[in-house]
C-alpha cells in the first residue's frame, strides 16, 4: 500500500482531461438541450398565455356583440310590438268603420225597405179607403165615383175665392195651356164640363190639355204656370198618412 | 496477493510506469467519453427524447440539483468538476461486476490524486469567488487562534477523502478475493452486490464532501453579497420613509 507519485500525477492529468472532455461532450450539450427545451416550453407557455388572452378578448368581444345584438333584438321586438299594436288598432278602427258603414248601410237599406213596405201599405190603405169611399158613394148616389169627383172638382173651381181667381187669371196671362190631370180618363162630356166651367170663371177661352195620372188616386188637378188647383182623396188621406207616418 | 492495481505494471521506464490503474482509467475514460459523444450526438430539445438522453439528463440535472442544495448557487460553474468526480468514481466502482476487473479507485495513488484535485480546487474556487484575501480570511474564522486548526483541517480532510475512498473500495475488492478462496459459490456474489452499493455511496460521499468544501471556501462571497443586498434594502427603506 504505497503511493506511486507518477500514477498520482498521471491520474490528476487524466482527471483534468476527463473533466474537460465530459464538460465538452456531456454537460454542455445536455444543459444546452435542457435550456433550449425550457426556452421552448416558456415560449409555448407565453404563446398559450397570449392565445388565452386573445381567446378571452375574442370571448369578451363576442359577449359584447351578443349584448348589442340582444339590445338590438329587444329594440326591434319593441318596435315590432308597437307597430303590431298600431297595425292592430288601425285594423280594428278600419273594421269598426266598416262595421259602422255596413250598419249604416243596413239601417238605410232597412229604412228604405221599411219605407217601401210602408208605401206599399199606404197604397193598399188608400186603395182600401178608396174602395170603401167608392162603395159608400155608390151606395149614397147612383153616379159613379169619378162623376162625383169631377162634380166636387168643378164645385171647387166655382167656389174659388176672389184672390185665387186673380192668381189663376195671372197664370193664364202667359199664354201657357192649362193642364188637367186625372186618375181616370175623362169622357168628352166631362171634358166639356171642365172647359165650360173654366170659361165661365175666367170669362175667356183657354187651351186645356188633359192627361191621365193614376197616382193621383181618384182625383183631378189643374196646373197652369205655377198655379195648382186639385181635389183628390189623397188630400183627405194625408192626415191618415201623417198619423201612421207614411210618406207619399 | 496484490492489494493495489498499481502493482500490476505493464511497462516501466525509470519514473514512468504504466500500470493497471492507468490503463483501467484510460479505458473508463474512453468508454465514458464515447458514450457521451454517442448520446449527445443526437440530442433533441423537444419533448420526445431517447431513453439514453433521458438518463443522462436525469444524471446531469440530479447532480446540478445536489450542488445547488449544498449551497452553491452557480451550480453550472462547479458541475464540470464535481460531476466528473462523481461519474468517474461511480463508474469505476460499478464496473466491479465485470470479472477480473480491478477498480482504479482501489489504488491509493488514484484516490490521492482525486483528493489532491479537491485540495487544489477548493482554494482555486475560493480565490476565484472571494479573491486571495477573502479566501485567506476564511482561515482566521471565527478567530485568529483557529488558524493552525483550520490549516490542519484543510490537510487532514484531504487525507481523509483519499484514505476513505481507497479503504472502502480496496477492502471491498480484498474481501471478495478472500471470500472467493473460502466460499467460492454464492457469497462473493452477495459481496459484489454490496460492493456496488458501497461504490455508489462512496462516489456520492466523495463528491458531496468536495462540494461542501468548495461551498465553505466560496461562502464568504455569498455572505458579502447578502450583506450588501440587505444594506441596499435598508437604505432604500430609509430613503422612502424620509
Image (tube, coloured by chain):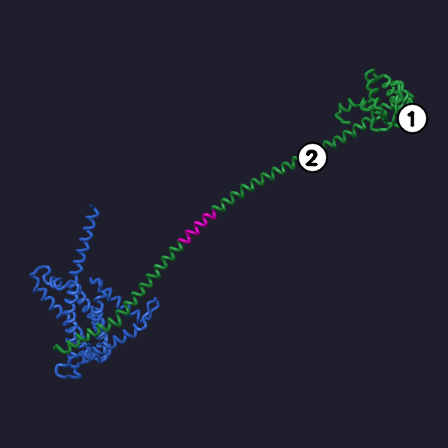
Residue B89 placed where, x, y %? 21, 72
| Same chain? Circles 2 and 1 | yes
Tell me the residue at 25%/66% (across/down). Answer: B62
Apparent side of residue A206 relative to residue B103 in the rendered image (left or right): right
- Which residue position holds label 2? A105
| The residue stretch that appears in magenta | A57-70
Inter-mark Cα distance, 2 to 1: 48 Å
| Chain displayed in green | A
Residue A131: percent from left, percent from top = 85, 25
Q: Quadrant of residue A123?
A: top right
Residue A34 in which image quadrant:
bottom left
Q: Secondary structure at mark 1?
A: loop
Which chain comes out blue in the rendered image?
B
Q: Quadrant of the N terminus of chain A?
A: bottom left
Relative vertical location of residue A134 with respect to residue B212 in this rendering, above or below: above
**Residue A41 seen in render:** yes
Q: Which residue is labeled 1 in the image?
A: A187
Q: Nearer the viewer, residue A222 or B132?
A: A222
Amino acid at each position: 500500500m504505497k503511493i506511486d507519485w507518477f500514477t498520482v500525477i498521471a491520474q490528476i492529468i487524466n482527471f483534468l482531461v476527463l473533466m474537460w472532455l465530459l464538460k465538452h461532450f456531456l454537460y454542455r450539450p445536455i444543459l444546452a438541450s435542457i435550456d433550449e427545451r425550457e426556452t421552448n416550453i416558456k415560449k409555448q407557455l407565453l404563446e398559450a398565455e397570449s392565445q388565452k388572452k386573445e381567446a378571452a378578448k375574442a370571448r369578451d368581444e363576442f359577449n359584447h356583440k351578443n349584448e348589442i345584438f340582444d339590445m338590438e333584438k329587444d329594440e326591434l321586438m319593441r318596435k315590432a310590438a308597437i307597430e303590431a299594436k298600431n297595425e292592430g288598432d288601425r285594423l280594428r278602427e278600419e273594421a269598426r268603420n266598416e262595421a259602422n258603414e255596413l250598419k249604416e248601410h243596413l239601417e238605410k237599406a232597412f229604412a228604405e225597405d221599411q219605407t217601401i213596405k210602408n208605401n206599399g201599405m199606404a197604397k193598399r190603405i188608400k186603395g182600401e179607403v178608396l174602395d170603401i169611399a167608392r162603395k159608400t158613394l155608390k151606395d149614397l148616389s147612383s153616379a159613379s165615383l169619378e162623376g162625383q169627383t169631377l162634380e166636387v172638382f168643378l164645385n171647387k173651381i166655382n167656389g174659388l175665392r176672389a184672390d185665387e181667381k186673380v192668381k189663376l187669371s195671372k197664370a193664364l196671362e202667359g199664354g201657357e195651356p192649362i193642364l188637367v190631370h186625372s186618375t181616370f180618363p175623362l169622357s168628352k162630356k166631362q171634358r166639356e164640363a171642365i172647359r165650360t166651367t173654366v170659361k165661365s170663371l175666367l170669362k175667356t177661352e183657354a187651351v186645356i190639355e188633359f192627361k191621365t195620372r193614376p197616382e193621383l188616386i181618384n182625383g183631378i188637378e189643374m196646373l197652369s204656370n205655377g198655379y195648382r188647383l186639385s181635389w183628390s182623396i189623397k188630400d183627405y188621406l194625408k192626415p191618415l198618412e201623417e198619423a201612421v207616418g207614411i210618406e207619399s | 496477493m496484490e492489494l493495489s492495481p498499481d502493482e500490476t505494471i505493464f511497462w516501466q521506464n525509470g519514473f514512468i510506469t504504466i500500470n493497471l490503474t492507468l490503463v483501467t482509467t484510460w479505458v473508463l475514460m474512453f468508454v465514458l467519453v464515447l458514450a457521451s459523444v454517442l448520446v449527445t450526438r443526437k440530442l433533441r430539445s423537444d419533448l420526445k427524447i431517447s431513453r439514453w438522453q433521458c438518463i443522462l439528463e436525469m444524471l446531469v440535472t440530479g447532480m446540478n440539483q445536489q450542488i445547488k442544495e449544498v449551497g452553491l448557487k452557480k451550480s453550472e460553474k462547479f458541475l464540470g468538476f464535481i460531476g466528473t468526480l462523481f461519474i468517474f468514481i461511480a463508474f469505476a466502482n460499478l464496473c466491479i461486476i465485470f470479472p477480473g476487473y480491478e477498480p482504479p479507485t482501489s489504488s491509493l495513488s488514484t484516490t490521492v490524486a482525486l483528493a489532491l484535485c479537491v485540495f487544489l480546487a477548493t482554494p482555486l474556487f475560493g480565490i476565484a469567488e472571494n479573491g486571495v484575501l477573502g479566501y485567506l480570511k476564511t482561515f482566521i474564522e471565527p478567530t485568529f487562534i483557529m488558524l493552525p486548526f483550520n490549516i490542519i483541517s484543510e490537510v487532514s480532510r484531504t487525507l481523509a477523502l483519499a484514505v476513505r475512498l481507497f479503504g472502502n473500495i480496496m477492502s471491498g475488492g480484498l474481501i471478495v478475493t478472500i471470500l472467493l478462496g473460502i466460499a467460492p459459490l454464492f457469497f462473493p456474489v452477495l459481496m459484489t452486490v454490496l460492493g456496488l452499493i458501497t461504490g455508489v455511496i462512496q462516489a456520492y460521499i466523495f463528491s458531496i464532501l468536495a462540494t461542501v468544501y468548495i461551498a465553505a471556501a466560496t461562502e464568504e462571497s455569498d455572505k458579502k453579497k447578502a450583506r450588501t443586498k440587505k444594506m441596499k434594502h435598508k437604505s432604500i427603506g430609509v430613503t422612502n420613509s424620509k
